Amino acid sequence: MNRTFTPKAGEVPRSWHVVDATGVPLGRLSTQVARLLLGKHKPQYTPHHDTGDFVIVVNAGEVALTGRKQGQKIYHRQSGRPGGMKKETAEELRQRRPRRLVELSVKGMLPKNRLGRKLYRKLKVYEGPEHPHQAQQPQAYELGI
């Protein structure tokens, strides 16, 4: 009888990828980044284990929104208090916190459990082209778009 191979936490090779978001549609960028975080590009992928890699997204402030999403897409947040609902468009969010567009989009594509929260911590998003992770020797990742 053959047993199913399940990788242990220390056996999974981790690598770092740098993704440039300049001019890339937000949804297409997010699906590729979520795939890398989940580890679906690896042969030892297991849905209930963390087999993914670290991902650095640079130039997040220049990500593209297609159609009229810039002015029509609404982001909600709730303070938890009565009447504490805040709404803002994608354009307003981009001016206030440009990284948040990418973070929210990728987070929505990860599992909604403790594994998803663990995977989300491996995402690093920066507004400009600079990032402090040179010591990890990240590889540039070409998006297949």
Image (cartoon, grey):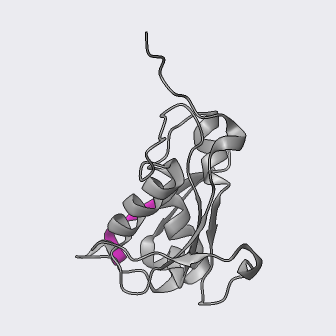
Q: Residue at x 35, y 77 (%)?
A: 70
Whether residue 133 sits left or right of residue 72 in the image: it is right
| Residue closer to the observer: 112 or 94 | 112
Residue 31 vertical placement versus 26 (above, below): above
| Residue closer to the observer: 39 or 93 | 39
Residue 23 vertical placement versus 57 (above, below): below
Q: How many marks?
A: 0
| Residue closer to the observer: 143 or 59 | 143
Q: Which residues are magenta?
A: 70-75
- Name the spot of residue 121 as percent of width and height, x first: 68, 54
Q: Residue at x 66, y 45 (%)?
A: 118
- Name the spot of residue 56 as percent of width and height, x first: 59, 72
| Residue closer to the observer: 70 or 119 | 119
Residue 23 counted in the magenta span: no
Residue 74 counted in the magenta span: yes
- Name the spot of residue 57 as percent of width and height, x first: 55, 74
Res. 137 image quadrant: bottom right
**Looking at the image, which residue sits at the far left?**
67
